[in-house]
Image: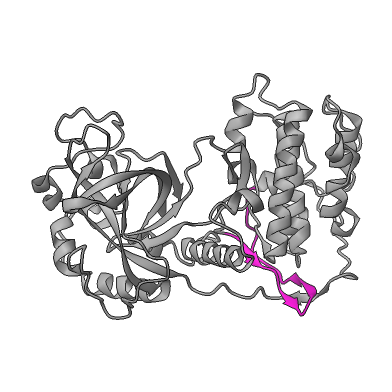
Amino acid sequence: MHGNVEADSNVRMTIQMSDQCLEPPMDPPPFQPATIRKCIRTLVRVCLNNSHEVHSREVFILTPLMSSTDALLARHTSSQASNIDVDDDSTEDEKSNSSLSSSDFETTDEDEVSDEEFSDTKESESTSNGIRSELESNGSAQQPQSPRGDTSTPPAGFRMQAYLLSRQALFENRHGVSTTYIYHARILKQGATNIWVNTGEECAVKAVAWNDIRARRSRMSEDILKEVAALQYVSDWHRKAGLGPLSSLDTHVMTADVIMSNETHLLVVMPFCPGGDLCELVAASPQERLTETEARYWFRQILKGLESLQRMRICHRDLSPENFMILENEALVIDFGMCLRIPYTGNSRHLISQRIPAGKKPHVAPEIMLERPLDGHAIDLWAVGTILLFLLTGQRFKNPPLRDHALDRVELGISQEAMDLLRKMFRLDSNDRLSLKEVTNHPWTCSQFLH
């Protein structure tokens, strides 16, 4: 277990935040509600390998139908309200229907498929799981009927494809009243004679039940609907910048390939990152800390991700080692559930008006805990400093230090250049801290020497 850097959290000093370079506080502009594609969960015939064996599999088929999150939420809320008194005798598990659990993708007959995490499903068992009723209510996968509020105009470049999810979730994250599941998935395309074939492409699918989304709204600062709106904003920014399909590796910011929904779940399709996150990387290191050469490699990528967020005019608010995934030996920012758009007037940046504290306590800037107006750039850069501290030492703050020069008398067993960088990133007054440009140009960041 990683240690913690002691911080004097009992000394609640007033933070002097000069806004001489920033305009007065403003509320952050909202993200536009995301537009989501309809998908249908159904049984299809699938050929996954070169043996040409065909198996019955349960998949999510993407359709050209589209709807806004607001329309979908209203529809599901209305449906829930109309059924409040119908199933009083049903169990809590039956009412929640919140997870795509292992039973939803359970192997029901033996076969020789090499990838055992992807399951077979018999039609009779799938019908008992409610798939047949979903097909009857939504039309066939080939010619879906457009429900009210949807548009059947296919988006530019639309291709019919399906997603075969792994039998078990890779991750299960509980957030109070709701649970988010992350699955490994294969992308399929429709071949001859209506048999779906493996494209060889992999992805990750984040699934959240609509029941959980309704229960979670207004209760937590992390909002899945805001997250998908932010992901769509990020994807639109990449597209307007003329960046290609692998643009996440250029900007170091994760984009969503597809955002889709069926009657029970909202699903976000993202690149599959088998390398895990930076927290796992450090935990796997012999000393549970990286060498300075290793830390510098990843820190430079983190800075590139932060630079991209600033260009997008986004304040993430939850940067941490867990929220940088590794793809092709590159670190990508993920998890936009707490992010805010930074308010601007023309090219003049404003402070963000007072917010309820959000983020992981070891990584939040002191001004967040004191509920003061925020410099969106400064609070993210503070969090980046805490990530560097973690990479170099395996340690985190217990609480954000509320006194200045907190690290000036602390030795962490790292080089003087690295210590100098951390001390200058952790000044109490955000205007005394290094800027992103100054951090990028600091001698330690630029150093080519081994430590």
The answer to whether residue 426 of the structure is visible from this angle is no
Residue 276 percent coordinates (x, y): 53, 36
Magenta span: helix, strand or loop, mainly?
Answer: loop
Residue at the spot 69% in from the left edge and 57% down from the top edge: 308
Residue 309 percent coordinates (x, y): 68, 59
Based on the picture, tell me whether residue 347 belongs to the magenta stretch.
yes
Based on the picture, tell me whether residue 103 belongs to the magenta stretch.
no
Residue 167 percent coordinates (x, y): 29, 39
In front of the other: 188 or 412: 188
In front of the other: 276 or 394: 276
Residue at the spot 91% in from the left edge and 31% down from the top edge: 416
Residue at the spot 77% in from the left edge and 44% down from the top edge: 385
> What quarter of the picture does the N terminus occupy?
top right
Determine the image quadrant of residue 177: bottom left
Determine the image quadrant of residue 422: top right
Residue 30 percent coordinates (x, y): 59, 74
The answer to whether residue 437 of the structure is visible from this angle is yes
Q: Residue furthest top?
A: 286
Determine the image quadrant of residue 113: top left
Q: In the drawing, does residue 303 fall left or right of residue 218?
A: right
Residue at the spot 29% in from the left edge and 37% down from the top edge: 118
Q: Which residues are magenta?
A: 338-360
In front of the other: 433 or 187: 187
In front of the other: 435 or 374: 435
Q: In the drawing, does residue 59 fall left or right of residue 224?
A: left
Q: Residue furthest front?
A: 192
Q: Residue furthest left?
A: 124
Q: How is the image coloured?
A: one colour
Instruction: Count the numbered circles shown.
Output: 0
Q: In the drawing, does residue 255 fall left or right of residue 395?
A: left
In the displayed structure, 234 sits above or below 115; it is: below
